Image: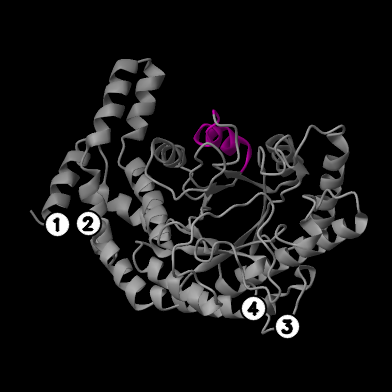
C-alpha cells in the first residue's frame, strides 16, 4: 500500500478514540526544536586562539568530516535541516562568534560578531538561541567561574553573561522570535568541600548582577541550568538543581532541565508537571545519558517518549522550550543531528496520538485496569504510518531513505575536507 493509503487506515484507527490526526499534524509542524550547533564540530568553536575543551565536557571519536569553519558548519546544519520535518531553531554558544581574525575576548563579544549567523537564520527561516561559554578558557581552568573567589575572574564572566543576554536580545529583534539565553557553568570541586555555602553566595551575587541589566523579554528569555556532577566536580557542584530551581522561581527566570544532569534514578519527565504548576515556561536540553552525562545521540527510548507525553498531556506544547544537547564524534555528525531531532519529533507525534483525556478520566475513576490496558495497546497503534505521511507532506525523506542523502553528502563534501 502507498503512504497515503496507510495513513488513511491509521486515521480511522485513531479516530475511533476521538483523535483528529490531521489536526495533530497541523500542531506538530509548528513545534520548533532548538538544534545545537556544537554537534557539528565537537564543541570546537571558531575563536582565533582556540582553547582545549574543558569544564568536564568530553567528546569522543574521530569520525571524518568535522566542520572547521562557520561556512562548513552552516552547510552541515542546512543538510541536516533538509532531512528533518518542520521549521526549527539553531542553538549557538559564544565560541561560535565570527571576529574576522581579530582576537576578541569573551567579555567583549557583541551582536556584530554574530551577524553572519543572523543573516543565515533569516535566509532559512530559523530562530536562534544562545549560550555564554563558561568553559574551555584560561579563566575557567581551575573549575570555577561565576563562583570564583577571585573577584576579577568573577567580573570577567559576569560581563560575558551580560553581553550574551544582549546578543540573545539582538537575535530576537532581528528574527522576530525570542532567543533563549541559557547560563550553565562548570563550577564545583572534585573532592568533598569544607564550605558549600560561600561559593553559592558568590554565584547568587554574580547572577543578581547579570540580571540587573535589563533585556526585553519580548526578544530574550533567560534560563539557568543545573547539574548534579561533572568531571572535576564529582563531589560538589555550586549550581545544583535546588540552587537554580529556587533562584529561577524567586527571580522569574526559566529553569532549564537537562536530561543528563540528574542522579541516575531521577527522570526529567517526572519533574515536568511539578515545574509547570509554578512556572509559565520551562526549558529542556534533551540528550541521552549512558551511566553519566555522556550526551549520547537521542534515541526513541522510554524516557524520551515519557518527556513528550508529559508535554502533550499537560497541554504545554507552547510552554516548554525544547532544545537538544548531545555530541558524538564517533558517527557521521549530520546523521547524529538527523537521528536525534527526528526522534524528538517522533516522540511528540506519538504523544499526540494517544487519547490522553480519556486516560486521565480512567485514572480519576480508579479504573486502573483499562488505563494500563490502553496505555499498552497504543504502543503498537499505527503511529509509523502517520510519521511517514508527515515526512512526505513536509518534503523530507521517508523512513531510512534520508541515510542515502547523508552518505552522498559524506562522499561529496565531508570526506573532502
- Check disc 4 and report its element: helix, strand or loop: loop
Q: Is residue 72 toward the left or the right of residue 342 in the image? A: right
- Disc marking residue 4: 1
**Residue visible at 28% across and 28% down?**
376
Q: CA distance from mark 1 to mark 3?
A: 54 Å
Q: CA distance from mark 3 to mark 4?
A: 9 Å
The magenta span reads 265-279
Q: Quadrant of residue 132?
A: bottom right
303 relative to 390, above or below: above
224 relative to 310, above or below: below
State the image coordinates of residue 363 (x, y, percent, origin top left): 39, 21
Q: CA distance from mark 2 to mark 1?
A: 7 Å
Q: Nearer the viewer, residue 251 or 146?
A: 146
Which residue matches tag 4?
Answer: 98
* Closer to the eye: label 2 or 4: 4
- Residue density around tag 3, few if under 14, some if 14–19, many if 20 or more, within 10 Å: few
Q: CA distance from mark 2 to mark 3?
A: 48 Å
Which residue matches tag 2?
Answer: 389
Q: Nearer the viewer, residue 229 or 129?
A: 229
Image marks 2 and 1: residues in contact by CB distance under 8 Å: yes
- Disc marking residue 320: none
267 inside magenta stretch: yes
Q: Quadrant of residue 70?
A: bottom right
Which residue matches tag 3?
Answer: 102
> Who comes first in sequence, dot 1 or dot 4?
1
Amino acid at each position: 500500500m502507498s503512504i497515503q493509503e496507510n495513513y488513511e487506515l491509521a486515521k480511522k484507527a485513531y479516530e475511533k478514540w476521538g483523535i483528529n490526526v490531521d489536526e495533530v499534524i497541523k500542531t506538530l509542524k509548528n513545534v520548533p526544536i532548538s538544534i545545537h550547533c556544537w554537534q557539528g564540530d565537537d564543541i570546537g568553536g571558531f575563536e582565533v586562539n582556540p582553547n582545549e575543551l574543558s569544564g568536564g565536557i568530553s567528546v569522543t571519536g574521530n569520525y571524518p568530516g568535522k566542520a572547521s569553519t562557520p561556512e562548513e558548519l552552516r552547510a552541515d546544519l542546512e543538510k541536516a535541516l533538509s532531512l528533518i520535518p518542520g521549521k526549527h531553531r539553531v542553538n549557538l554558544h559564544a565560541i561560535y562568534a565570527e571576529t574576522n581574525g581579530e582576537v576578541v575576548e569573551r567579555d567583549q563579544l557583541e551582536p556584530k560578531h554574530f551577524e553572519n549567523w543572523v543573516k543565515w537564520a533569516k535566509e532559512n527561516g530559523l530562530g536562534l538561541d544562545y549560550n555564554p561559554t563558561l568553559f574551555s578558557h584560561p579563566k575557567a581552568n581551575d573549575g570555577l567561574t561565576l563562583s570564583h573567589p577571585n573577584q576579577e575572574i568573577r567580573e570577567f564572566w559576569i560581563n560575558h553573561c551580560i553581553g550574551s543576554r544582549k546578543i540573545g536580545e539582538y537575535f530576537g529583534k532581528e528574527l522576530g522570535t525570542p532567543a533563549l539565553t541559557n547560563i550553565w557553568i562548570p563550577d564545583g570541586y572534585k573532592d568533598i568541600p569544607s564550605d558549600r555555602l560561600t561559593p553559592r553566595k558568590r554565584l547568587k551575587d554574580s547572577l543578581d548582577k547579570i540580571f540587573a541589566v535589563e533585556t526585553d523579554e519580548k526578544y530574550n528569555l533567560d534560563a539557568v541550568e543545573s547539574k548534579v556532577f561533572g568531571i572535576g566536580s564529582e563531589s560538589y557542584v555550586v549550581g545544583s538543581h535546588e540552587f537554580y530551581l529556587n533562584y529561577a522561581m524567586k527571580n522569574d527566570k526559566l529553569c532549564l532541565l537537562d536530561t543528563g544532569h540528574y542522579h541516575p534514578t531521577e527522570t526529567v519527565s517526572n519533574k515536568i508537571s511539578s515545574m509547570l504548576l509554578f512556572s509559565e515556561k520551562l526549558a529542556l536540553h534533551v540528550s541521552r545519558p549512558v551511566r553519566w552525562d555522556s550526551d549520547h545521540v537521542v534515541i526513541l527510548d522510554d524516557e524520551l517518549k515519557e518527556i513528550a507525553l508529559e508535554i502533550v498531556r499537560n497541554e504545554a506544547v507552547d510552554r516548554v522550550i525544547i532544545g537538544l544537547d548531545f555530541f558524538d564524534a564517533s558517527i557521521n555528525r549530520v546523521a547524529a543531528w538527523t537521528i536525534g531531532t527526528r526522534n524528538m519529533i517522533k516522540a511528540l507525534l506519538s504523544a499526540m496520538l494517544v487519547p490522553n483525556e480519556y486516560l486521565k478520566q480512567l485514572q480519576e475513576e480508579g479504573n486502573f485496569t483499562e488505563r494500563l490496558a490502553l496505555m499498552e495497546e497504543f504502543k503498537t497503534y499505527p503511529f509509523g504510518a502517520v510519521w511517514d505521511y508527515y515526512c512526505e507532506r513536509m518534503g523530507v525523506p521517508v523512513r531510512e531513505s534520508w541515510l542515502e542523502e547523508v552518505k552522498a553528502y559524506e562522499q561529496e563534501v565531508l570526506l573532502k575536507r
